[in-house]
Image: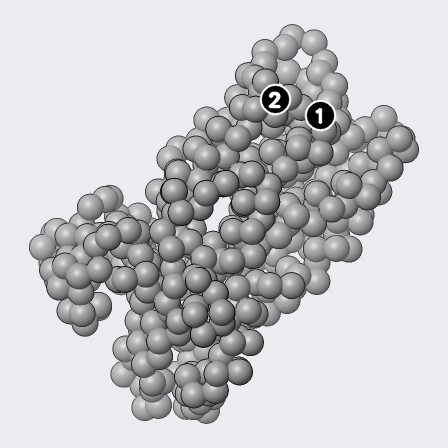
């Protein structure tokens, strides 16, 4: 059985995973299911109020790994994507509705509350013998020919052959590994909150494209919806600071009053947006997954979808590794980097291009973007191809 552990002497294990969020917990579980001894170093974290829209390939990962055996039990199906150009630009895109049935799919994926996902992951971990969790923080690392030794903030010393950093954008593991990042901070931030609408979204994720970013309503079951609103930080802060009635009126205006009266059912949170990609995702027995390796604005449904692809590739590398070799952790970290960097760079390019196209005031760019929406709307074969690319199929 998985267990919390408290030790005074040096602990030996195969792999240490640092980070108690979704990526870290999923990575620790998937690796432990290979029969590899895992210590999951996961301090108690604040509640994650965000949601994750996971596309079909990610749902396949969740179900095949047993992380979420029945997605429909904790997630909400997304079977349509509706795009509305709400900008005041000279050249505007047509309204478009994309239905998963056109691609021969019952849905594009599911929308999950991150808290529910993490609870499901934790329940899975309880039944894996090779998984152990220590509720503590990482405080330092030393590498030598015998492996990697880390210290925790409560005085424990742990020795391993591989260290997996899943400790977020400000990753201490990444810093200790000496891995640099390329980071771009955007003027835009993202405001998120939960709403109850007057009319159901009927399984559709509705994206209103405004000059400074999309205003997206994601289905959360019945008349419930999750809002992800991207705009300049000062605009979002002003909206959040307004009284509740003024804030609701602003939301109704941005949603063009298409879904009736709106009620706010949660707190309102604002997150700054950045592009972040590590120069390397593995070296000297240390590897990075999740936001320790990459972070993007929430466009193109990447985020956790990309993190799950990290985990799949890491598991594949570990399956192929000869753990009888003294330096297997170092060799595996190098193999992981070779396997992952192409996907990360490709995703970075796609997200940057998409984000720039949403914000562009340059008329030729507006024309190309509008023409692209027209093409997707009018050409079924192109639309079907775009569905599969957008869902992250490889």
Residue at 80 percent across and 49 percent down: it is 335
Q: Quadrant of the N terminus?
A: top right
Is 104 on the left or on the right of 162, as rendered?
left
Q: Position of residue 183 (x, y in %)?
A: 56, 58
Above or below: residue 320 compared with residue 84: above
Question: In terms of depth relative to the viewer, which is nearer, 323 or 393?
Answer: 393
Q: Nearer the viewer, residue 54 or 10?
A: 54
* Residue at horizontal 30 percent and vertical 48 percent from the top: 269
Disc 2, SS: strand
Q: Earlier in the sequence, mark 1 or mark 2?
A: 1
Kindly identify the residue that appears in the image at 56 percent across and 38 percent down: 66
Would residue 233 be visible to someone looking at this image?
no
Q: Where residue 354 sits: x, y (%)?
A: 49, 73
Camera-nearest residue between 5 and 136: 5
Label 1 to label 2: alpha-carbon separation:
8 Å
Residue 349: x %, y % from top left: 59, 69
Whether residue 394 appears in this view of the structure is yes
Vertical placement of residue 194 versus 218, above or below = above
- Front residue (pair 57, 7): 57
**For residue 17, which quarter of the picture?**
top right
Secondary element at tag 1: loop
Left or right: 372 with respect to 265?
right
Q: How is the image coloured?
A: one colour
Name the quadrant of the C terminus.
bottom right
Task: For label 2, count other residues whose C-alpha is less than 10 Å away and answer few (under 14), some (14-19) or many (20+).
Answer: many
* Residue lying furthest left: 245
- Whether residues under marks 1 and 2 lie with C-beta atoms below 8 angstroms apart, the answer is yes
In terms of image quadrants, where is residue 14? top right
Q: Residue at x 74, y 46 (%)?
A: 316
Q: Which residue is mark 2?
A: 132
Residue linked to disc 1: 37
Q: Quadrant of residue 96?
A: bottom left
């Amino acid at each position: 059985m998985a267990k919390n552990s408290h030790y005074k002497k040096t602990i030996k294990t195969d792999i240490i995973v640092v980070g108690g969020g979704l990526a870290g917990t999923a990575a620790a579980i998937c690796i432990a299911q290979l029969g590899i001894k895992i210590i999951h170093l996961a301090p108690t974290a604040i509640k994650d109020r965000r949601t994750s829209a996971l596309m079909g390939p990610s749902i396949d990962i969740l179900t095949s790994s047993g992380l979420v055996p029945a997605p429909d039990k904790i997630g909400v199906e997304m079977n349509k994507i509706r795009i509305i150009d709400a900008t005041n630009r000279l050249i505007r895109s047509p309204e478009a509705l994309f239905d998963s049935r056109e691609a021969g799919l019952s849905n594009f994926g599911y929308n999950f509350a991150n808290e529910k996902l993490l609870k499901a992951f934790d329940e899975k971990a309880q039944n894996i013998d090779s998984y152990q969790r220590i509720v503590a923080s990482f405080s330092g690392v030393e590498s030598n020919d015998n492996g990697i030794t880390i210290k925790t903030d409560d005085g424990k010393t742990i020795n391993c052959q591989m260290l997996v950093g899943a400790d977020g954008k400000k990753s201490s593991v990444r810093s200790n590994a000496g891995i640099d990042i390329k980071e771009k901070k955007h003027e835009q931030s993202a405001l998120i909150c939960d709403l109850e609408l007057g009319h159901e979204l009927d399984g559709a994720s509705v994206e209103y494209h405004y000059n400074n970013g999309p205003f997206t309503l994601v289905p959360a079951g019945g008349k419930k919806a999750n809002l992800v609103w991207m705009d300049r930080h000062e605009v979002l802060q002003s909206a959040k600071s307004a009284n509740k009635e003024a804030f609701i009126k602003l939301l109704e205006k941005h949603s063009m009053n298409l879904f009736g009266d709106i009620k706010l059912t949660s707190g309102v949170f604002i997150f700054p947006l950045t592009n972040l990609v590590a120069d390397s995702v593995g070296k000297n027995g240390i590897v990075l997954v999740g936001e320790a390796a990459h972070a993007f604005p929430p466009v193109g449904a990447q985020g956790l979808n990309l993190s799950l692809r990290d985990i799949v590739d890491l598991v594949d590398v570990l399956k192929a590794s000869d753990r009888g070799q003294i330096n297997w952790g170092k060799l595996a970290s190098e193999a992981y980097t070779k396997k992952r960097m192409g996907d990360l760079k490709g995703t970075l390019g796609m997200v940057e291009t998409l984000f720039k196209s949403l914000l562009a005031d340059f008329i030729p760019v507006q024309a190309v973007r509008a023409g692209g929406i027209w093409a997707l709307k009018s050409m079924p074969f192109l639309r079907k191809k775009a569905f599969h690319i957008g869902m992250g199929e490889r």
